[in-house]
Amino acid sequence: MRKLFLLNSLALFTSFCFVSSAFPYEKGNLPIRACEDETKVSITLEEKKELTPDVLLLNFRVNVTAFRETEAVNLMGNLDESLRKLNLEYKGGKYSVRENCWWDKGDRKCAGYKGSIAYSFLLKNYSEQNEIFKVINRFKKEHGEKVKLEVNEPEWIVSEKRRKEAERELTVLIFERAKEFSKTASKALGKTCDVETINYEKGPLRYHPEQFSTFISAEASVVKAPQPEKEEKSVSVRANVKLRCK
């Protein structure tokens, strides 16, 4: 559903145009600047569209502990290979290995190594997350307490392809509104107004929380994860439009 904005601003701005054409321009915050034989007008337009999400974003991290550094790397490598075989779209796979150290009464002590590998899976169906958890579940059974799973809050999002399509559509709508506004300004000022510049701003979709806060136990033989609800996401495009009227 498409929503239009700034209609009240347009009406108020039009009244400013009438005033500026009848009285000399004085310092203030009016979006209009008069020159000797031309007038410059500016306005901000915005278009917004609600989209139903089509991709389930699943962020998770797997932590491993091992006696040797190479063992930690191999653990994560084996898990990565199993996840790749699922042929699901994902980003990430970046990993780190560090010595497992802590402080005890002012002394630094170390024992073994800790590793971590993180993924962001882009799933078309919520049931696909179960396939991922089954792989990790089997991996955990093989290696026991060496493997820990952290899952961020899964969320339905709008795919990048659909978001870009919506932004292109909204950009065209703003361009058409800018042309209509130039006609309105021309009539109000008694001049010929042309679009000088259009500076677009695209509103971000925020759905990438950083903190991994939800923990899932991988003890059950059958894994069936909850199904997140789909909540509509807003895609918006805002633009500052400047007119030159002669």
Image (tube, rainbow, N blue to C red):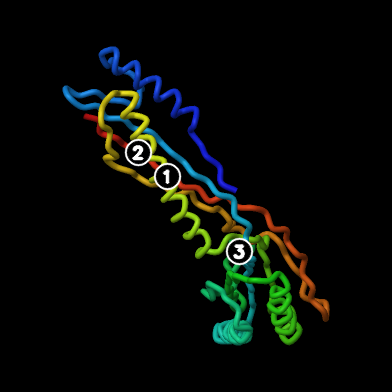
Residue 25, given in percent of the width and then of the height, sits at: 27, 16
Could you tell me how far apart the alpha carbons at marks 1 and 2 are, in whole angstroms?
A: 9 Å
The residue to which callout 1 is attached is 174
Which amino acid does the dot numbered 1 rest on? Ile
Of labels 3 and 2, earlier in sequence is 3
Of labels 1 and 3, earlier in sequence is 3
Indicate whether 92 appears above or below 68.
above
Residue 194, given in percent of the width and then of the height, sits at: 27, 37
Which amino acid does the dot numbered 3 rest on? Trp
Secondary structure beneath dot 3 equals strand
| Count of numbered circles on the image | 3
The residue to which callout 2 is attached is 241
Q: Which mark is residue 187?
A: none
Which amino acid does the dot numbered 2 rest on? Val
Q: Residue at x 77, y 65 (%)?
A: 226
Q: Residue furthest left?
A: 36
Q: Residue at x 25, y 33 (%)?
A: 244
Residue 180, given in percent of the width and then of the height, sits at: 39, 38
Could you tell me how far apart the alpha carbons at marks 1 and 3 are, in whole angstroms?
A: 59 Å
Q: Residue at x 71, y 61 (%)?
A: 214
Tell me the quarter of the picture where residue 128 sits: bottom right
Secondary structure beneath dot 2 equals strand
Tell me the quarter of the picture where residue 76 sits: bottom right
